[in-house]
């Protein structure tokens, strides 16, 4: 086994090999590592040694096991407070509400005239486009559409965003969302999109749009959230100076 101390037990050797691959970026944050059987075959080890190595790295917080999906590389934990920008999952976690997302589409597309102006790009620059549904206690509460310049997060396509927060992905890549322009309006969705969040076409939604910048003033994300008003409320606080 390469990159290992042969005086150490086999599972420790494998543990350190995997750790090195994580640190060197061969196993990027947010992506799945090879399966237990693949690791056993690659390094000519028995399954128990592989399982012991992975268990040690999970205990350290470097890996995260997801039933039915595999073992994923964890990123560093970001410190946050309630007055900083955060996504849907962070907000729900802070309120101890069971929440998850389901990705309908994640693909590259040209920025085009509108999004190139909005995000300070060229028209033929590529954007990551994501459409997903947010759930609260297994009930759909919002339809999200997310636009991120590819040059901002080139590895975005490899990360499972049903498991990891986009704001965590920003943090792992050295980006810190610091401010956003928000717009709130009420509108009606076409039937096919309304059905995705268990509404009919005659039921209004709240559209919350966000244009997010990092600490350098760079535009890093534009999102539209079509939110069910019967499941969500917005709160803001004003203080007289």
Image: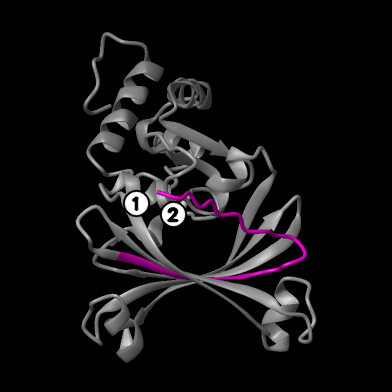
| Residue at 23% across, 78% down | 121
Question: Disc count in the image?
Answer: 2
Residue 212 appears in the rendering: yes
Q: Residue at x 36, y 11 (%)?
A: 9
Mark 1 crowd level (few <14, some 14–19, many ≥20, 10 Å Cα): some
Residue 109 vs residue 121: left or right?
A: right
The reply to whether dot 1 and dot 2 touch (C-beta < 8 Å) is yes
Counting from the top left corner in percent of width and height, residue 215 is at: 24, 52
Question: In the displayed structure, does residue 168 sit left or right of residue 226?
Answer: left
- 27 shown above or below 209: above
The label shown at residue 170 is 1
What residue sits right under mark 2 in the picture? 166
Dividing the image into 4 quarters, which one contains the N terminus? top left
Give the magenta range. Answer: 220-241
Q: Is 232 within the magenta?
A: yes
SS under mark 1:
helix
Query: Residue extending furthest top?
Result: 7
């Amino acid at each position: 086994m390469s990159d290992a101390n042969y005086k150490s037990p086999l599972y420790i050797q494998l543990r350190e090999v995997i750790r090195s691959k994580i640190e060197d970026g061969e196993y990027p944050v947010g992506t799945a590592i090879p399966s237990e059987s693949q690791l056993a075959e690659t390094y000519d080890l028995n399954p128990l040694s592989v399982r012991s190595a992975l268990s040690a790295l999970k205990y350290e917080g470097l890996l995260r096991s997801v039933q039915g999906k595999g073992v994923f590389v964890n990123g560093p934990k970001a410190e946050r407070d309630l007055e900083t920008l955060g996504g849907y999952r962070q907000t729900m976690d802070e309120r101890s509400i069971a929440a998850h997302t389901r990705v309908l589409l994640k693909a590259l597309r040209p920025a085009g005239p509108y999004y190139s102006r909005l995000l300070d790009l060229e028209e033929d620059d590529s954007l990551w486009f994501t459409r997903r549904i947010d759930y609260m206690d297994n009930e759909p509460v919002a339809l999200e559409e997310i636009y991120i310049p590819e040059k901002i997060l080139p590895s975005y396509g490899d990360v499972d965003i049903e498991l990891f927060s986009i704001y965590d992905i920003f943090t792992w890549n050295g980006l810190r969302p610091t401010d956003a322009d928000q717009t709130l309006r009420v509108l009606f969705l076409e039937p096919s999109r309304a059905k995705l969040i268990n509404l009919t076409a005659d039921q209004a939604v709240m559209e919350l749009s966000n244009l997010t910048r990092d600490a350098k003033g760079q535009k890093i994300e534009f999102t539209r959230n079509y939110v069910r008003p019967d499941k969500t409320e917005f709160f803001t606080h004003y203080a007289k100076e």
